[in-house]
Amino acid sequence: DLPAHVRIHEVGARDGLQNEKSVVPTEVKAEFVHRLATAGLRTIEATSFVHPKWVPQLADAEQLFPMLGDLKGVALPVLVPNERGLDRALALGAHRIAVFASATESFAKANLNRTVDESLAMFEPVVARAKADRAHVRGYLSMCFGDPWEGAVPVHQVVRVAKALIDMGCDELSLGDTIGVATPAHVQTLLAELNEEGVPTSAIGVHFHDTYGQALSNTLAALQHGVSTVDASAGGLGGCPYAKSATGNLATEDLVWMLQGLGIDTGVDLGLLTATSVWMAGQLGRPSPSRTVRALSHQ
Ligand code: HMG
Ligand code: MG
């Protein structure tokens, strides 16, 4: 059975812009987030409080976040890797944070300069303090299907880290196919195994990158399993600077087009969203890779 409603977790301003060669001006980012909200998105990941040298594209988090203060009724989660990041986020009044773990050692090292267990130890006080502050905590889990250094990732390895994040107190998980190699049967196998190990589908979101053009098929497989939180990025922006083979996320327009066809409510105005991605593509100086954006805008 497909869910009646899908919550889209929009990641264009974070996952999208973290991967751009050029640094987008803060005012443009603020306008981007406002336009996404006007298009009807209600969960818009705003930025990351990571080390500015690791992700210079998002080094303006302190300037950007307060510019979004007028967005009532819009959840604005931010990425936080450690207590230093949490301090910065809480100081600005953020009340939805996300930690980001890896299912593989190679990516934990590349992205966090830690082993998997060291990064879990780094997140523990972050999650505990955030929960004590009554913040909502998302736990990203990267490389759930394949890893650029290690190849296919065994399901049990993913389940171990997923359970650790839930046991730590994360309110929800986001299963990342960071390099976009997943296929639908693999998605359903992982979801079934997580359920088997006590992680309910209601606590699971999916985060697909579209490298092999499978993001939408994988999303449908997850919806058929009962998943109702789907990450996507406007115009298909995205990637990860610490995983070279990662391309853009599932485009929000492609997702909304499919969900509309399935009669699933999202609250998103596809025309306004497409116009936003066309405008952003203009800012970035290249066309959106989203097929739906191209079809609807004759780009
Ligand atoms: P490190 O070099 O090990 O840092 O990096 P450290 O803990 O040794 O600290 C070194 C210095 O950095 C210290 O300063 C800290 O205060 C400072 P010093 O005492 O030397 O003057 N520092 C900070 N400054 C500001 N903000 C902070 C911060 N933390 C430390 N938060 C670290 C470790 C985790 C910081 C680093 O590896 C990092 O920032 N990594 C972030 C990488 C990243 O953002 N990647 C992209 C997001 S993940 C993703 O895209 C995947 C996802 O989309 C899902 C998917 O697709 O799979 C979510
Ligand atoms: Mg990602």
Image: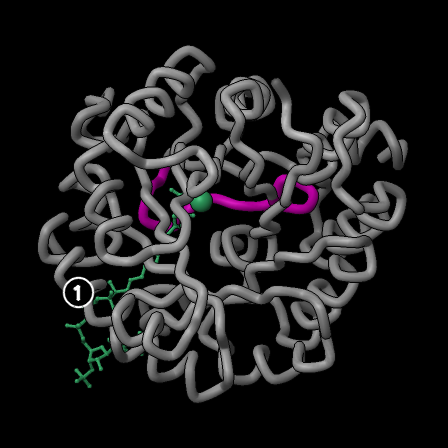
Magenta includes 243? yes
Residue at screen point 40% across, 22% down: 181
Residue 94 x/y as whole percent = 50, 77
- Is ligand 1 less than 8 Å from the beta carbon at label 1? yes
Q: Nearer the viewer, residue 228 or 206?
A: 228
Residue in the image at 82% along x and 61% along y: 38
Q: Which residues are magenta?
A: 233-244
The residue that appears at 45% across and 64% down in the rendered structure is 136
User: Which quarter of the figure is the C terminus placed in?
Assistant: top right
Q: Decide which of 269, 266 is in the foreground and name it.
A: 266
Give coordinates of residue 95: x percent, y percent. 49, 74
In the rendered structure, does residue 117 fall within the stretch colored magenta? no
The answer to whether residue 7 is above or below residue 171 is above
Residue 167 is situated, as x and y percent measured from the top left of the image, at: 22, 51
The colour mode here is one colour
Graded by Cα atoms within 10 Å as few (under 14), some (14 to 19) or many (20 or more), the crowding at tag 1 reads some
Residue of label 1: 122
Q: Foreground: 265 or 56?
A: 265
Instruction: Please state which amino acid type lies under the numbered disc 1.
Output: Met
| Figure label count | 1
- Relative to 126, 60 lies left or right: right
